[in-house]
Image: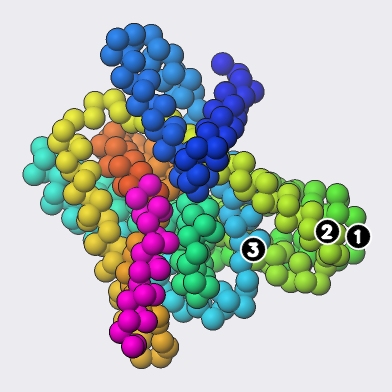
Amino acid sequence: MSLFELLAILLVIAALLGYLNIRYLKLPTTIGIMLMSLVVSFTLIVLGLFVPAIEQMAENIVSQIDFSNVLLEVMLSYLLFAGALHVDLSDLAKQKWVIALMATVGVVLSTALIGTAAYFLLPLFGFETKFIYCLLFGALISPTDPVAVLGILKKAGVGKSLKTKITGESLFNDGVGVVVFLALLSIATGQHEVSAGHIAELFVVEVLGGIAFGAAIGLLGYYLLRNIDNYQVEVLITLALVTGGYALASHWHLSGPLAMVIAGLMIGNHGRLLAMSNTTRQHLDLFWELVDEILNALLFALIGLELLIVSNQFTMQTFLLGLIMIVVALACRATAVSIPVTILKPFRRFSDGAIKMLTWGGLRGGISVALALALPEEAGRGLFLKLTYMIVIFSIAVQGLTVGKLYRSTIKEAKAEEE
């Protein structure tokens, strides 16, 4: 099947599910589409028990879509740029230390905690694997997903300060998480020995190099936008900036996600204020909002359809282990959030229930699934993919649907205590 045919099928499914969600379920678009695509997948699996050809045909179609490459190499750049485009840099600066600690110390600590917990839990369910592979699982499941977070927080009614913390962390920690994952993967596959120097070099090149590159292309984009006033060309410049910039960052082994975040922040703040007319701002916002919505719909439809692939050999032991790992992931997230908040509490005030909200609002999404798919077979990809999938589905469906309610109840509790 050709790429065009695969894209056509996915677009039709996403559009149909989006329509049904808006018409009947009225859930946030991303959650509604994912839940319905899960129902479609489950229905096909059940039908496959009676007519195996139906499930086999659907599975063959989905298996032709390389989820990991589609997300990490194509969708992610546009989604991160579109998300960063609407983040206020001044608000982000006020939360810089919280975001920096959670996106670095928090990710590394969560990786170690989840990896260690998995290493001791797996044998209890009949699975044996190396500690380094468990750490890889910890690295891929620790970062919060900016795509899931940005899409859901828009509808949750979360306060400005908390929203900035969660959004800012999610924009930056996936870049750090990918670097941690790559460092552990190179050690696990024997490409490099365990070396502080190698990890430091990878961090400097990927993270700091990605940030510097993002600033450079952001400045270039700002200069080009400032010197013309034609919204069609200006929108085209931002599109070229993202596409060409991400491709070049990948070619130079820099962090493309971080580069897109920095470029998006620069164009969305200085570029919007000083280099665009009102007409350009309106068209630019509409264009990137549309790109964001379409790609989100496709991504979450694809996450639901991936059940056709993940469901193979899903045993009761795997399911029970997955339920336990959901609790473990939340507990480790709470610990990784508590430490930065505790460190900074003497120097700044945090709202009541900040740790609880940062824990529950730290959603996992497609990036974790994509990294799990990138694991080698010998690293336990089959098992860790299933565990990742369960955590991601719970995160988006349960946490995503209740984060707004949790925030409102936290505010009510705080007001009641004051009275």
If you read the primary sequence from the N terminus, does the residue marked by circle 1 or circle 2 appear first? 1
Q: Which residue is mark 3?
A: 86
Residue 188 shown left or right of residue 175 in the figure: left
Amino acid at dot 1: Asp
Asked whether residue 277 is drawn in magenta, I would say: no
Distance from disc 3 to disc 1, alpha carbons, whole Å, reads: 21 Å
- Magenta stretch bounds: 397-419
Q: Which residue is mark 2?
A: 280
Q: Is residue 241 above or below residue 276?
A: above
Q: Nearer the viewer, residue 191 or 299?
A: 299
x, y percent for residue 313? 24, 26
Which circle marks residue 128 in the picture?
A: none
Label 3 neighbourhood size at 10 Å, few (<14), some (14-19), many (20+)?
some
Amino acid at dot 2: Thr
Residue at position x 26%, y 62% in the image = 332
If you read the primary sequence from the N terminus, does the residue marked by circle 3 or circle 1 appear first? 3
Q: Which residue is mark 1?
A: 229
Label 1 neighbourhood size at 10 Å, few (<14), some (14-19), many (20+)?
some
x, y percent for residue 47? 34, 15
Cβ atoms at labels 3 and 2 below 8 Å apart:
no
As helix, strand or loop, the secondary structure at mark 1 comes to: loop
Residue 349 shown left or right of residue 289 in the figure: left
Q: Is residue 49 above or below residue 156?
A: above
If you read the primary sequence from the N terminus, does the residue marked by circle 3 or circle 2 appear first? 3
Q: Is residue 311 above or below residue 188?
A: above
Quadrant containing the C terminus in the rendered view: bottom left
Give the number of the mark in front: 1 or 2. Answer: 2
As helix, strand or loop, the secondary structure at mark 3 comes to: loop
Residue at position x 61%, y 46% in the image = 293
Amino acid at dot 3: His
Residue at position x 47%, y 40% in the image = 25
